[in-house]
Image (spheres, rainbow, N blue to C red):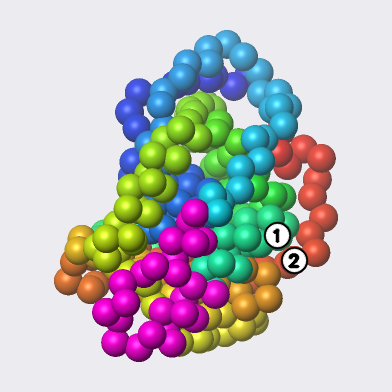
């Protein structure tokens, strides 16, 4: 019988931020995750969760991209970035898929491999295959709620990530875009997991992100987190992806 435990601290590790934040709008504006409030679940068995809240990216998020600083060296790159991010926000998080993903944290040289199952907005299952100490761990996100199964401890950790928190962070980013503090531009293209992807670079004074967005589906195929010195601190990318997946009924229970 599994033990249920609360998160007694925010789920804020670098690897956790990269994997727990499945909301497309947050990734789009440069937040790979969000703080999660602790919530105790003692003595309960895992059960099927309720229907996820289907949240779509605010229309303002797409509109705001059109106002990205006019001081960019090449206005065509800014326009292309707006088109790519528009596809990402409108379509990417709606596209179902099953993929094999690699996540690398440069500090400490941590590398992990996961199977990611995405059924729709805010509905994700991430199962770790490597390293050995994380093999079998599962992160399940359903709406604003997530569960993290840790077989080594025989526990399921539970937490919530309020949509209100997401909304507040989105507003902060949009204000940065309008003021010119945050900029975005297209910087090229590349094939990732056998899919053609366009690359968008998002910049803030503290660093930024590069996002590889599938040209057809709008799915994020790869991302890099950058620090203020332009060094990559974390990268996540798919090695395989299937856009016509078949899910097991128990996958999201």
- The Cα atoms of the two marked residues, 2 and 1, are separated by 7 Å
Q: How many marks?
A: 2
Query: In this view, which residue lies farthest toward the top?
Result: 43
Q: Nearer the viewer, mark 2 or mark 1?
A: 1
Q: Is residue 221 above or below residue 74?
A: above
Q: Is residue 103 above or below residue 151?
A: below
In the image, what residue occupies the spot 54% across and 74% down?
Answer: 84
State the extent of the magenta-drawn residues as a range. 60-83
Residue at the spot of label 1: 95
In the image, what residue occupies the spot 49% across and 54% down?
Answer: 60
Can you see residue 15?
Answer: no
Q: Is residue 241 left or right of residue 186?
A: right
**Residue 72 is one of the magenta-drawn residues:** yes
Around disc 2, counting alpha carbons within 10 Å, would you say few (fewer than 14), some (14 to 19), or many (20 or more)? few
Quarter of the image with the N terminus in it: top right
Classify mark 2: helix, strand or loop: loop
Q: Which residue occupies the foreground of this view, 145 or 251?
A: 145
């Amino acid at each position: 019988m599994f033990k249920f435990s609360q998160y007694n601290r925010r789920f804020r590790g670098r690897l956790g931020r990269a994997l727990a934040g499945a909301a497309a709008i947050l990734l789009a504006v440069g937040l790979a995750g969000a703080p999660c409030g602790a919530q105790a679940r003692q003595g309960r068995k895992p059960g099927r969760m309720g229907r996820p809240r289907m949240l779509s990216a605010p229309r303002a998020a797409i509109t705001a991209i059109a106002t990205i600083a006019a001081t960019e060296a090449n206005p065509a790159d800014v326009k292309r970035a707006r088109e790519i991010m528009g596809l990402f926000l409108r379509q990417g998080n709606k596209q179902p898929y099953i993929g094999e993903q690699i996540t690398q944290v440069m500090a400490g040289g941590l590398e992990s491999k996961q199977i990611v199952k995405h059924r729709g907005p805010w509905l994700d299952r991430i199962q770790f295959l490597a390293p050995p100490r994380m093999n079998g761990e599962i992160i399940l996100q359903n709406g604003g709620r997530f569960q993290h199964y840790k077989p080594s401890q025989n526990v399921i950790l539970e937490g919530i990530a309020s949509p209100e928190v997401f909304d507040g962070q989105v507003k902060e980013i949009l204000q940065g875009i309008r003021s010119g503090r945050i900029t975005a531009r297209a910087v090229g293209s590349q094939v990732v997991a056998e899919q053609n992807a366009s690359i968008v670079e998002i910049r803030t004074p503290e660093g930024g992100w590069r996002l590889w967005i599938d040209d057809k589906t709008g799915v994020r195929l790869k991302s890099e987190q950058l620090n203020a010195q332009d060094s990559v601190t974390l990268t996540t990318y798919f090695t395989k992806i299937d856009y016509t997946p078949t899910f097991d009924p128990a996958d999201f229970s």
